[in-house]
Image (cartoon, rainbow, N blue to C red):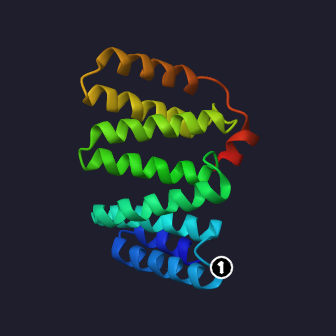
Amino acid sequence: MLGAIAVTHSMMGHPERGLEAAAESVAGYGAALGEQHPTYAWALGLLGGMQAGVRDFDAAERTLLRSIEIGERLLGPHLSRVIEARTNLGGLYSITRRHAEAMAMRRRVLDDARASGRPDSPGTVVMISELAKSHGILGEFARARELQAEATALAKQPIDRFQTAQAF
């Protein structure tokens, strides 16, 4: 519940309140379920996103890495929540101009999304586009164009509604 409140505060333009609710969510899930629980890992991912939103990039990186570590150990690398935390970490690396790390993380996310059995999900299209952007930033324009063409072709394909609902 606090996670939903955190997101609502953030979307309404109150990121500090969102951050506070996300931190309370992490503390509550940690106390109730323990730190080695998937819901705790999800709450950490949410908190990391909120920390990035208020530009506390060091804390966001630590929190997202912890979320990924717990989630991957408990659920595997291909679960949508683990992929989501990796996606946020790749975005964080891009925002902080760590472009090589952003590209490596985006490649990992794309590999995990493809291995998840949902290679045609909207998130995969976005990640291919983000990876294309990373290649462009690093001056690898031919590869950027190839990836963008792949994302465009994938986006034009019909998507199985059930599969899309399962991706999120």
Of residues 113 and 160, the one drawn nearer to the viewer in this rendering: 113
Is 83 displayed left or right of 142 in the figure?
A: right
Say above or below: 145 vs 54: above
Of residues 88 and 64, the one drawn nearer to the viewer in this rendering: 64
Q: How many marks?
A: 1
Q: Quadrant of residue 145?
A: top left
Q: Residue at x 37, y 18 (%)?
A: 143
Quadrant of the snapshot with the N terminus: bottom right
Say above or below: 153 vs 30: above
Of residues 96 and 166, the one drawn nearer to the viewer in this rendering: 96
Q: Position of residue 153 (x, y in %)?
A: 54, 19
The residue sitting at the right extreme is 162
What kind of residue is marked 1? Answer: Leu
Q: Position of residue 54 (x, y in %)?
A: 30, 66
Q: Position of residue 69 (x, y in %)?
A: 52, 58
Q: Residue at x 47, y 63 (%)?
A: 66
Q: Which residue is mark 1?
A: 33
As helix, strand or loop, the secondary structure at mark 1 comes to helix
The residue sitting at the front extreme is 73
Say above or below: 104 vs 150: below
Q: Residues within 10 Å of mark 1 (few under 14, many from 20)?
A: few
Of residues 50 and 26, the one drawn nearer to the viewer in this rendering: 26
Q: Position of residue 28 (x, y in %)?
A: 56, 83
Say above or below: 140 vs 72: above
